[in-house]
Amino acid sequence: MPTLTEKKAVVEEITEQLNNSNAVYITNYSGMSVGDMGELRGKFREGNVRFKVYKNTLIKRAMDTIGGYEDLYPHLAEQNGFAFVEEELAAPAKVLKSYIKENDKPKFKAALIDGDYYTEDQLDTLAAMKSKSEVIGDIIGLLMAPMSNVVSGLQAQGSNLAGAIQSIAEEGDE
């Protein structure tokens, strides 16, 4: 049984994880083997997601310290794993959706992303979210489109003008 000092250290670790994360996902890993958990952790690692198993009472204590996690409290029961992410907020959802499709476990329970609460029936929506870099790429593409249209329009007009001048010059030679 962990000592009070050890529990305080874990609560501090969780608090730091929560402070450094823009999203936390909760999954129920009941019925998963140690090998399955290792495989899932590996998939999360590939997506730059930290996945940890904590006691629900300790994570609740850390969430109480920070505040703003009240929507997740009803989900702090059973055997839970917690995915923490800083950048690509949809990465855990993509990993979970893919893994659940292949293995039928774990069960996605809820997520808190930038202060917004998502329930278990919104996993598909979360997995479909574009990453920050994809959104930036889309915006740049939209901004570049008018410029490329202007350039191609000018090039087309220039080639038409050059063609017209050449035709006139050829008619004058005859």
Image (spheres, rainbow, N blue to C red):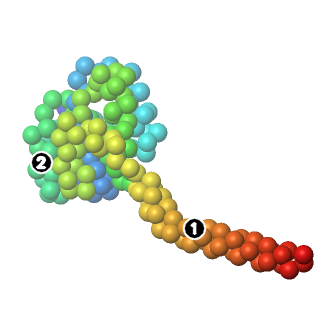
Q: In the figure, 84 relative to 44: above or below?
A: below
Circle 2 — which element?
A: helix
Q: Residue at x 86, y 80 (%)?
A: 172
Nearer to us in this view, 73 or 166: 166
| Mark linked to residue 148 | 1
Q: In the figure, 104 relative to 147: above or below?
A: above
Q: Residue at x 43, y 42 (%)?
A: 47
Quadrant the N terminus occupies: top left
Is residue 116 among the parts visible in the rendering?
A: yes
Q: Distance between the residues labelled 2 and 1?
A: 47 Å
| Picture coordinates of residue 110, whole percent (x, y) | 20, 40
The answer to which image quadrant residue 43 occupies is top left
Is residue 16 among the parts visible in the rendering?
A: no
Q: What residue type is labelled 1?
A: Ser
Is residue 168 found left or right of 77 in the rendered image? right
Is residue 112 found left or right of 70 in the rendered image? right
Nearer to us in this view, 34 or 131: 131
Q: Which amino acid does label 2 sit on?
A: Asp
Residue of label 2? 71
Q: Seen from this angle, which residue lies furthest right?
A: 173
Circle 1 — which element?
A: helix
The answer to which image quadrant residue 50 occupies is top left
Nearer to us in this view, 90 or 124: 124
Number of labels in the image equals: 2
| Picture coordinates of residue 142, whole percent (x, y) | 46, 63
- Are the residues flagged by discs 2 and 1 in contact, CB closer than 8 Å? no
| Picture coordinates of residue 111, whole percent (x, y) | 22, 44
Q: Residue at x 15, y 51 (%)?
A: 69
Q: In the figure, 132 relative to 95: above or below?
A: below
| Picture coordinates of residue 53, whole percent (x, y) | 27, 35
Quadrant the C terminus occupies: bottom right
Q: In the figure, 171 relative to 61: above or below?
A: below
